[in-house]
Image (spheres, rainbow, N blue to C red):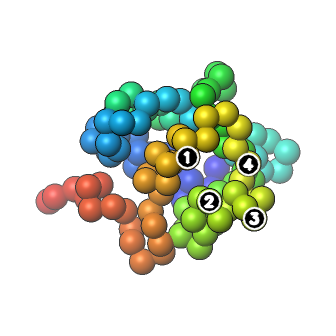
Amino acid sequence: MVEAIERFFADIDRYGPGLLPSKYSGTIRFDLSQDHVTEQVLVTIEHGQVTVRRDDREADCVIRARQDSFATLLSGQHGIYAALWRNLISIEGEFPLIAAVRELIPPNPTVDRPERWRVEG
């Protein structure tokens, strides 16, 4: 998987507690393809607490994208809604969970990670 994508999911897993407001709950599966191979990552959100694992089980929301397109999204070149409108990603299921994904993605290239992700020391 592309390094930026690996880092994104590792950061979510590492900083999962407290990343999102407690109003968010559900499962989001990311189906990310490259060279006819699809890697699946499941993000579980329970009242704002986030965990990540590689899993192909059913989810409340499924986001599909080519890995290069998803890496572009993570770079801040496009917002998640713009990526959807440009057909860089597709979404099935509970669309409101996209708001949670939007909060997890760094907003632009000049911001490494949200302040709440920064580790002291």
Dot 4 lies on which element? strand
CB-based contact (under 8 Å), mark 4 and mark 1:
no
Q: Which label's residue is closer to the chain start, 4 or 2?
A: 2
Dot 4, crowdedness within 10 Å: few (<14), some or many (≥20)?
some
Does residue 59 appear left or right of residue 119 in this picture?
right
Residue of label 3: 86
Name the quadrant containing residue 77: bottom right
Dot 2 lies on which element? helix
Q: Quadrant of the C terminus?
A: bottom left
Does residue 30 appear left or right of residue 6 in this picture?
right
- How far apart in space, not on screen, are marks 4 and 2 (Cα)? 10 Å
Dot 1 lies on which element? helix
In this picture, is 64 found above or below 118? above
Name the outermost residue toward the left.
Answer: 121
Where does the image place residue 78, in percent across and percent down from the top left?
61, 69
Dot 2, crowdedness within 10 Å: few (<14), some or many (≥20)?
some
Does residue 53 appear left or right of residue 48 in this picture?
right
- How far apart in space, not on screen, are marks 1 and 3 (Cα)? 16 Å
Residue of label 4: 90
Residue of label 1: 98
The residue depicted at 72 percent of the width and 61 percent of the height is: 85
Where does the image place residue 21, in percent across and percent down from the top left?
32, 42
Closer to the camera in the image, 40 or 78? 78
